[in-house]
Amino acid sequence: MNIAHSILGVANTPKLLFAVLALSAATHLAFFNTPNEVVFDEVHFGTFVRSYITGERHFDIHPPLGKIIIAGIAKLGGANLSSDLTLIGQQYPAKDLFLLRLFPLLAGIFLPVVFFLIALEITRSKFTAFLVGLFFVFENALLVQSRFAFLDIPLLFFGFSALLILLKQERASNRKTKILLLFFAAILFGASYAIKWTALAIVVPFGIVMLFSLWHNRSIKWFAAKISVLFIVSLALYATSFAAHFSLSSNPGPGDIYLSREFWTKPFFQKFILLNKSMYEYNKNINAEHPYSSSWNELAINKKPIYYWMGSPTQVRDKYTETAYGSSRIAKQIWLAGNPFIWMIGLFSVAAGFVLLFLKLLFRKSNLPPAFPIAVLLSGWVASYLPFALIERPLFLYHYFFPLAFSLLISGCLIQWIISKKPLKKYTAPFVSAILLFAIAGFLAIAPVSYGINFTQNGLYQNIILKHLISL
């Protein structure tokens, strides 16, 4: 019995959902909290989190909510955080690192479930939803980013949870239920851009969903009400995160040099506006070069993996290596690198989606995939990706996570369309089995540098797989 046949035989959505969750938990919890050393941008985010516990003022280019949540978890868990995180590779108490990394980990575990539910909402196919969920389970870059004190995975979790709730709101028939769901969508949306402004790109697919609803229902009053709820509630949550930031930052600190002394006497809304203006200006003027930064057109092709961490190589001697080659050195490294097969599926799906949408709108053929979900998802991909072409600051592979997520949802729509064709139905099992096997193979090939697993220096893995990975 092949993989796809066994999957197709499971008809119960809760079982499929649990399978996605179980696999996600397994991949995320494996080797979790190793290394107990500071990794890449934990130098920045960890220090900002510690500032909330010490009360020292700091300045960051991103909104404060994600760091405040991590600080709250660390405080509740009894983290000591006795010193700043200042250097990549710095030794740090394992318990403290565990607590700093817990929130991104939990968001990462549940992220594939969110995309399972979005794919189910869009395609109405449990099987396709399961396949999309597995794409997110076996995507190495998303996995790595969720295992450390970074904010990109919580950003994705809140942003796409908001999209999921908005889609469910569109299907609800009861007006009170719709309002309640809109309220929750607005909270989640506000939480996403209160972590990083890049989440604001999701406004575009939100707008298309609501415009389609306006065209269908012809109710401008209800359309205005939905926009008002999403705007007011999300902005209120965003502002509240800054109120918490100000209340937790009452002591002098390194952030004082970025803002005038008068800044800390002014009323809240003045401080709120001034700080956001300073964040924008600082973001706009970042122009420092970085060896692992990417140009905007390199992001989508998984071109520049990022070197996150390297363990100290250890010398290993045994009678076999001594006799034939002398001693061997065992290395550990962590790279932020995407599963090349899954990223390729996403990029191909975007290209195919544009072509099929154009043909659908031009010829109105019923045998092409539905235009609405493809249009919504493509709008999200465009809105979250193309603005990077206008940004001069250094970009990194994780900046493509939002577009990647939209591209994989598009792939679900296209796969569902392909396997629904009568002539192709008999090939569904081998077709989907091949996709899954390649996705898992890509995951396993990169897993050693996703988890920081030992490999022999100048051995087969480094000279073939890792060398190719770095030169992508």
Image (tube, rainbow, N blue to C red):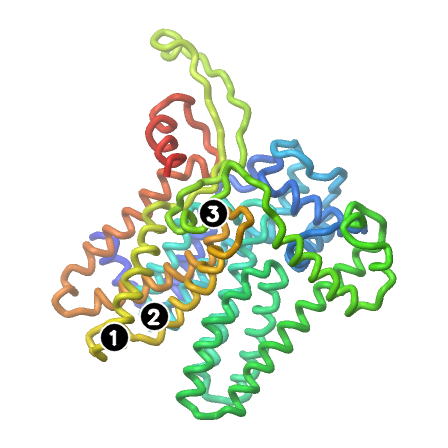
The one nearer the camera, 231 or 153, is 231
Please rate how many residues cluster around mark 2, counting C-alpha atoms within 10 Å: few if below 14, some from 14 to 19, many from 20: many
Identify which amino acid the numbered label 2 is placed on: Ile
- Asked if residue 216 lies left or right of residue 36, the reply is left
> In terms of secondary structure, where does tag 3 sit?
helix
Q: Where is mark 1, residue-wise?
A: 360
Percent x, y for residue 453?
46, 32
Q: How much space separates mark 1 and mark 2, taking CA atoms?
A: 10 Å
Q: Where is mark 2, residue-wise?
A: 374
Asked if labels 2 and 1 touch by Cβ distance under 8 angstroms, the answer is yes
Q: How much space separates mark 1 and mark 3, taking CA atoms?
A: 33 Å
Q: Where is mark 3, residue-wise?
A: 397
Asked if labels 2 and 3 touch by Cβ distance under 8 angstroms, the answer is no
Q: Is residue 245 above or below residue 184?
A: above
- Asked if residue 102 lies left or right of residue 389, the reply is right
Q: Is residue 55 above or below residue 90?
A: below
Which mark sits nearer the N-terminus, 1 or 3? 1
> In terms of secondary structure, where does tag 1 sit?
helix
Which mark sits nearer the N-terminus, 3 or 2? 2
Q: Is residue 400 above or below residue 177?
A: above
Please rate how many residues cluster around mark 3, counting C-alpha atoms within 10 Å: few if below 14, some from 14 to 19, many from 20: many
Please rate how many residues cluster around mark 1, counting C-alpha atoms within 10 Å: few if below 14, some from 14 to 19, many from 20: some
The one nearer the camera, 6 or 293, is 293
Percent x, y for residue 471?
38, 35
Identify which amino acid the numbered label 3 is placed on: Leu
